[in-house]
Image (spheres, rainbow, N blue to C red):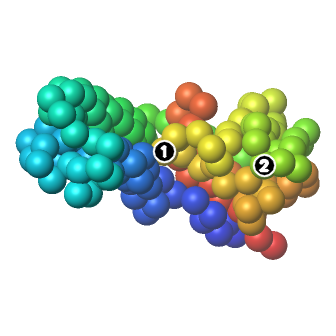
Amino acid sequence: MEFETAFDLARSGYKYGWFPAAALLPLLAGAVMAFAPRLAPRLMGSHVKGRLVRFFGMIFFVFAACWAALAFMNTWNDYRHHRDVLASGEYRTVEGVVENFRPLAAHGRGIESFEVKGVRFQYSPLALSPGFNRAAAEGGPIANGVHVRIAYFGLAILRLEIGRR
């Protein structure tokens, strides 16, 4: 049987840069309030003024900077660890037919799950996971009866291959 790669963590790259980047706007607002308090009323409205502007701006800035740093470190380290596991071959592999497939609910939240030869897999498109997490409703290839070969580590699908006849 021939296999077509549907997902490979090594090729997909780091895909969660948006998560730490979400702190950029609060970081900028905090920086303006803390380090350029005279600009704050012009940029943020006339109600933003006084000594508290600098104080709250500094709190905002520090919180946003910590958020961005921690979010990046956690998502990057998780991605890098799984990428290294894939490169080193320290993963498990299972090949077989998808059974007990449970797609996401109609509202798109929750967990999609399935089994291959008794090994259970679950994922969510909303989870910050470096592994495969594309739901069937979003064009994911998983369905009952599909022949797959999966390289996995813990709960993460590192490589997903779909059998073609």
Position above or below: 38 against 164: above
Q: Earlier in the sequence, mark 1 or mark 2?
A: 2
Position of residue 19 in the picture relative to residue 165 (left or right): left
Residue 63 at x, y percent in the picture: 28, 29
| Residue type at the position of mark 1 | Pro
Which quarter of the rendering shows the N terminus?
Answer: bottom right
Q: Mark 2: which amino acid? A: Gly
**Total numbered badges shown on the rendered structure:** 2
Q: Nearer the viewer, residue 78 or 17?
A: 17
* Residue on which the image places disc 2: 108
Q: Which residue is mark 1?
A: 130
Residue at 32 percent of width and 52 percent of height: 45
Label 1 crowd (10 A; few <14 / some 14-19 / many >=20): many
Screen quadrant of the C terminus: bottom right
Q: Residue at x 65, y 59 (%)?
A: 161
Q: Name the residue at 67% across, 55% down.
A: 134
Q: Is residue 17 left or right of residue 30?
A: right
Q: Secondary structure at mark 1?
A: loop
Residue 105 or residue 90, whichever sits in front:
105
Question: Residue 30: x, y in percent?
Answer: 23, 41
